[in-house]
Image (cartoon, coloured by chain):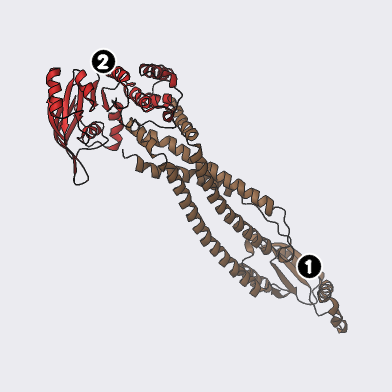
Amino acid sequence: MLRKAVFILRLAGQDIRGNVGVHLVGAAIIAAAFLTLGLFLLLAANLDHLARHWEEKIQLAVYLDGGLDDATREGLRKNLAAQPEVAGVNYTSPEAALAEFKLMLGKDSGLLEGLDENPLPASFTLKLTPGSREADKVRELSGRLGKLPGVAEVDFGEPLLESWQAGLRLARGAALLIGGMIVLAVVFIISNTIRLTMYSRREEIGIMRLVGASNLLIRLPFILEGMLQGGVAALLGCAGLWLLYYAGLHGLHWPGILAGFSPVFIARDTVLYLFAAGVILGAAGSLSRLRDFLKV
Amino acid sequence: MIELFHVCMRYGRDQQALTDINLKIDKGEFVFITGASGAGKTTLLKLLFAQEAPYTGQIMIDGKNVSHLKSREIPALRRRIGVVFQDFKLVHHWTVYQNVAFVLELRGLPGREVQRRVYQALKMVRLHHKLESYPLKLSGGEQQRVAIARAFIAEPTILLADEPTGNLDADITQEIMKLFTEVNIRGTTVVVATHDRFLLESMNKRVVILDQGRISSDGHDESSLIRAGRLARHGIGE
């Protein structure tokens, strides 16, 4: 058994050495296909990361009735903080709200000078937990909080949130579709590259069979080579992707609506999945093509 | 023992390669198959090691019907048969050693035994100094000798050879035939397809003549004079 395993490994090594050129060209094409897939995954990962970054900014403003005493207000704060969807509660007094409003108005803040009394109510600003930022959940929470004693109104910018999340759903659907197409193209390119590699070896496979090698013994070294070629090519594609990411995106900071967002590389799990895909496609491609050459 | 009963072979619809072949070759026999180009010599050999399946008829080897073997049954048959192919069939990116050793490694022989036997076999065909050469660096005759070494190294019960001396000079031809005779004396059945008239006349062996896919003549225990006349009548080697 061990002798057979050593024999098969040696055959695989012998064939890799004897066909270095074919293997290198094949691996380069497969690596390029994986790089293309990786670029798409990198884009998708960063869009997702950006969406999460923006979703963190989704907040709920709970406006309070006028004239609440401190104890009632503190009770309300504790009640709000105890809600499972709430990650943090921040109190804004009417005075602070007015100061903030003046700051927003800038040079037009003089408009507020004529007011006899502060019209702005006190409020609590609620940060939401990551799983509670969908429009339906926010709406349900808002309805629940609006019924609490001492609460005048709850605002979460409903139209904006809904159109943002509808846009996000559309983008994710489009990404899935494009991603699916890219995956199909990559699978097609990889399986055909391996088929071509195998085609260049058809004579050798025929000879092995003619001198008495069993199909299994012929297949095993080729499967090993296919797995190695696919796996190495996937890792090369990922390495190329990382180089592109490091040279072009890593540590980049943007102004405007992208402020505070820094790009990320694809997850380690994704790299492992790509490697596994390379290994599996390598083995499957070798197997499917071998069947055609084993008919002698 | 090899037996063929009413074997017909055709390629496609029209090309009849062999017609109603009935042939019995005893265990340990040495037989030449000859005939003009396209007479069906190579096809006949291909049927014996199941590279082709007969269109009709039955082929028995050592009592087992090998006419229509399943794909997974073929390797076991081929491991009992050594074949010298007309086009050598050597793997070009394997060394001479690796090409010859492969058939022993297939049988699971230990490394030292493989080394010893490969060296001996290559010495017999006078190529032991080219162990590490690649086939494409060798002449046609040398490649043929590597193919011959590979065919008999595993001591097969049957040795088939398709024009084994086609690329060899007279000296090497004599040596190869001597080698085949030795293998035959040790009990291996030898079937050689050739149209080399000198070879057919000089070796005192049974000669089966094929003509357009049919056995036209089969001589057992004939004198060399009768054999020469029979070959001349069929235009062999002209």
Say whether residue A79 is visible. Answer: no
- Judging depth in this view, the residue of A188 and A154 nearest the camera is A188
Q: Vertically, is A176 above or below B77?
A: below
Q: Vertically, is A270 above or below A296?
A: below
Mark 1 chain: A
The mark closer to the camera, 1 or 2, is 2
Determine which residue is flagged by label 1: A91
Image-quadrant location for residue B51: top left
Mark 2 chain: B
Q: Position of residue B119 (x, y in %)?
A: 41, 17
Callout 1: SS:
strand
Three-letter amino acid code at the position of disc 1: Tyr
Looking at the image, residue A91 sits to the left or right of residue A40; the answer is right
Colour brown maps to chain: A
Q: Vertically, is B178 above or below B196?
A: above
Determine which residue is flagged by label 2: B186
Q: Vertically, is A177 above or below A189?
A: below
Looking at the image, residue A40 sits to the left or right of residue B44; the answer is right
Q: Position of residue A142 (x, y in %)?
A: 66, 71
Q: Are marks 1 and 2 in contact (CB under 8 Å)?
A: no
- Judging depth in this view, the residue of A36 and A51 nearest the camera is A36
Say whether residue A114 is visible. Answer: yes
Query: Is the same chain shared between marks 1 and 2?
Result: no
Three-letter amino acid code at the position of disc 2: Arg
Image-quadrant location for residue B90: top left
Q: For chain B, what colour was chosen?
A: red
Q: Position of residue A278 (x, y in %)?
A: 51, 45
Residue at the spot 76% in from the left edge and 71% down from the top edge: A123
Callout 2: SS:
loop
How far apart are labels 1 and 2 at the CA level? 104 Å
